[in-house]
Image (cartoon, helix red, strand yellow):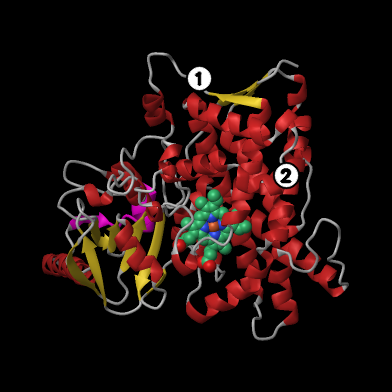
Amino acid sequence: MLNAVLAAVALFALSRLYKLWSGLKTIGYIPGIRCALGARSNLGALFGTRLNSALFYNPGANFAWEVKRTGGFKGETDIISVVPWLQGDPVVYVSSMEMMQQVLGYADTWDKEFGASRLFGANVATVRKEPWKRHRRVVSPAFSKKLYTLVWKESMQTFRDMVDAEGWDKKQSVTIPVLGDLTSKFTLNIIASCAFDFHSPWSDSISKIGQGLPLGKCLKVVIEDAPIRLLTPEWAYFLPIKAIKRVDTAFNTIFSFMRAQIALRREKIASEDVTSDNTQGRNTIFNNIVRANVDGGKFAFDEEEVISNTFIMLFAGHETTSRTLNALLTLLALYEEEQDKVYQEIQRILPNGRDPTFEDLESFIQIRKCIQEAMRLYPPATLLVREAMHDTQLNVTNKATGEVSHSVVLKKGARVVCDVIGIHYNPRHFPDPERFKPSRWDDESIDADAFAGFGQGPRACIGRKFSLAEATCFVAMLLRDWRVEVDRAEEESPQEWQRRVMTDTATGLRHLGPISVRFARRKPM
Ligand code: HEM
């Protein structure tokens, strides 16, 4: 018996040693962290740094944010590896523009690696190669000037509706207990109306749909609690465990909402009733997705692809913009002189307080710089992951000079994470990186191409202009009439407040936790 136990222990130890050795070989023996659970493994993400002890370091999914510069651990290069011996894949983190461009630029060598595709299925953001071209071909015609004009119009209407429904027009000052709740309700309303032709008033918003858990909350749960879903076996859903029940409810609510909308859209397509005033005619995002299933042909979507693409547009189209607005408005509240510059621009572009129009979008240069700087400091998408399609050479850059210091050979299947936080806080690209400094974008000597907020290369964000139009309109409308403020004791500097409050988790999508702000009317009523 004892011998059997010893043999089992020895076998286990050998198998773990083998896992570690083959992991190191896959990532070309790049130095870094050796740990039990990979940073991106489900268990590693679930336990996070709570597992850490003197003997044991579990990097957890948030570690790229916690250390700010993964490349800055030790050594002279902007690269480290995380190789687990118990669970998870070996992963390489790069935090220089030069290495990111090698990885994101070449779809033949590096293709998308998207753990979440196991949860959400095949969609334009998750598939590779030829299927990706098919998905992109279906959805991209909707991303046109017509759509962005509609985004602006809907943003204006929703903003006015929000002011009315919240009774702000009768108030001198408004306290927003959780800014993220307000912005995600706003951005969900916009994606629903512009992409899906689903209009809902502010007082009875789409975010409230659903029994038990409202849709807005469900969309957060499915992302933040994804590891729970991935780790839970079918039978466990019958157990009275709150976290599991919540994830299950969230998935069921979203999927039944989407199925109902898809069925309705099919009926509309069958009767060709898709040209109401509020749509862009046949060419809406949702219409294109469902039509690809109804019409069939070379670019056909199967049932699952329809659902999966509907989900990705609903999710990617709102949570990211909401997180950008949260960071931006909070930073403007903290750095009052930057908010003043934005207000001066608004006064200049909107004389006599007129409403902004879509034609004004390109003129709001100060707002654009502030959005970009907020996204640099708090990028909503923090990890851009790619997988080597064959054995591949990566040129490693020197941390101080950016020159190639040496090359490593990564094996087919190796995963590289472009660590957006590491790149955005790399002082070689952005001097004084911790500082909120929108004017840095005027400086031609900075590496503007190191900005990866919307990704780069062939898989860059398709919704960039959508979200810029929406965020610019929101900020122009809000700051024209209101001043944003946060409670900060005098003895605490804006930087200290920022470090204390504007920090939370970054498990792939960054979020800032609950931040309370106040809107103070600029001119007395
Ligand atoms: C501030 C807002 C947004 C941010 C920060 C953002 C960020 C990103 C990033 C970083 C990527 C590239 C991911 C990668 O390379 O692995 C991406 C891709 C994508 N985004 Fe966005 N996004 C935003 C808004 C939107 C909106 C409004 C939509 C849709 C209406 C959208 C839809 C997509 C889609 C479909 C992809 C996949 C593109 C492809 O693989 O071909 N995004 N986004």
Give the quadrant of residue 22: bottom left
Q: Is mark 2 within 8 Å of ligand 1?
A: no
Which of 108 and 473 lies nearest the eye of the viewer?
Answer: 473
Q: Position of residue 446 (x, y in %)?
A: 35, 48
Q: Is residue 167 magenta?
A: no
Give the quadrant of residue 124: bottom right
Mark 2 surroundings within 10 Å by alpha-carbon count, few (fewer than 14), some (14 through 19), many (20 or more): few
Mark 1 surroundings within 10 Å by alpha-carbon count, few (fewer than 14), some (14 through 19), many (20 or more): few
Which of 281 and 44 lies nearest the eye of the viewer?
Answer: 281
Q: Which mark is residue 357?
A: 2
Q: Which mark is residue 505?
A: none
Please give left or right for residue 274 compared with residue 209 in the image: right
Please give left or right for residue 234 compared with residue 259 in the image: left
Q: Residue at x 53, y 75 (%)?
A: 132
For the N terminus, the quadrant is bottom left
Q: Amino acid at mark 1?
A: Asp
Q: Secondary structure at mark 1?
A: loop
Task: Please give the residue where the numbered disc 1 appears in the rendered image.
Answer: 487
Q: Position of residue 126 (x, y in %)?
A: 50, 68
For the C terminus, the quadrant is top right
Residue 146 against residue 133 in the figure, above or below: above
Q: Residue at x 78, y 37 (%)?
A: 161
Q: Position of residue 296 (x, y in %)?
A: 71, 83
Whether residue 211 can be seen here: no
Q: CA distance from mark 1 to mark 2?
A: 33 Å
**Magenta residues, start to end:** 32-47
Q: Secondary structure at mark 2?
A: loop
Q: Position of residue 258 (x, y in %)?
A: 69, 61
Please give left or right for residue 11 compared with residue 465 in the image: left
Whether residue 439 can be seen here: yes
Q: Residue at x 30, y 54 (%)?
A: 95
Q: Amino acid at mark 2?
A: Thr
